[in-house]
Image (tube, rainbow, N blue to C red):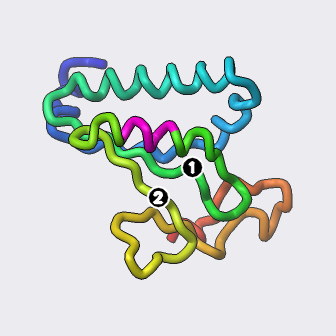
């Protein structure tokens, strides 16, 4: 990264909203190890910037896509470094005692128009 971009990373917050394409790499322990290694490299790189904090969101959209093994890994990273890494659960509706939660919409999914696209939101779903 060029010098003018690195100063932006000092004292900033990086939010990782995990892609569900990571799920296809998790069919074996070896594949999962590769994903974990990639995540660890990202964490190490971003934490090299002064004051940079990381947030990992739960890869569960409550619409049929859930990567539980990656969720557990994100929770482990947060437990190992609570000052530098946070984990944010997802929900379709906010529970009464929610704390910090990333809410996915119940409507506005592309599956309403194309049955095979279970991953993407429409413009309506993003709003």
Q: Is residue 17 magenta?
A: no
Residue under numbered circle 2: 89
Which of the 4 quarters of the picture holds residue 64? bottom right
Q: Measured along the vertical axis of the image, is residue 6 above or below residue 14?
A: above
Instruction: Specify few, some or many for label 1: CA neighbours under 10 Å numbering under 14, 14-19, or 20 or more.
Output: many
Image coords of residue 88 (percent x, y): 41, 55
- Tell whether 49 sits left or right of 44: left
**Which residue occupies 22% across, 33% down?**
9
Q: Where residue 109 sits in the image (x, y, percent)?
A: 69, 66
Q: Separation of disc 2 and disc 1 at Cα? A: 8 Å
The N terminus: image quadrant: top left
- Location of residue 9 with respect to 113 vertically, above or below: above
Q: Secondary structure at mark 2?
A: strand
Q: Which mark is residue 120?
A: none
- Tell me if 44 is positioned left or right of 64 in this view: left
Judging by the rendered image, the residue that carries numbered circle 1 is 59
Q: How many marks?
A: 2
- Tell whether position 75 is magenta: yes
Left or right, residue 50 beside residue 20: left
Q: Please give left or right for residue 86 compared with residue 31 in the image.
A: left
Tell me residue 14's x, y (percent). 32, 41
Magenta span: 73-78
Contact flag, marks 2 and 1 (Cβ < 8 Å): no
Mark 2 Cα within 10 Å, few/some/many (few <14, many 20+)? some
Q: Residue at x 31, y 40 (%)?
A: 85
Relative to the observer, which residue lies in front, 126 or 22? 22
From the image, give the main secondary structure of the stretch colored magenta. helix
- Circle 1 sits in a helix, a strand or a loop, which is it? loop
Q: Earlier in the sequence, mark 2 or mark 1?
A: 1
Q: Quadrant of residue 67?
A: top right
């Amino acid at each position: 990264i060029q010098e003018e971009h690195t100063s932006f990373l000092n004292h900033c917050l990086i939010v990782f909203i995990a892609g569900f394409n990571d799920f296809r790499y998790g069919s074996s322990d070896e594949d999962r190890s590769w994903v974990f290694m990639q995540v660890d490299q990202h964490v190490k790189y971003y934490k090299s910037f002064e004051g940079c904090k990381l947030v990992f969101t739960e890869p569960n959209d409550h619409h049929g896509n859930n990567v539980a093994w990656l969720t557990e890994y994100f929770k482990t990273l947060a437990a190992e470094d609570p000052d530098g890494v946070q984990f944010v659960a997802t929900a379709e509706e906010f529970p009464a005692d929610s704390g910090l939660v990333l809410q996915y919409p119940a409507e506005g999914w592309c599956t309403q128009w194309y049955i095979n696209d279970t991953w993407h939101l429409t413009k309506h779903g993003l709003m």
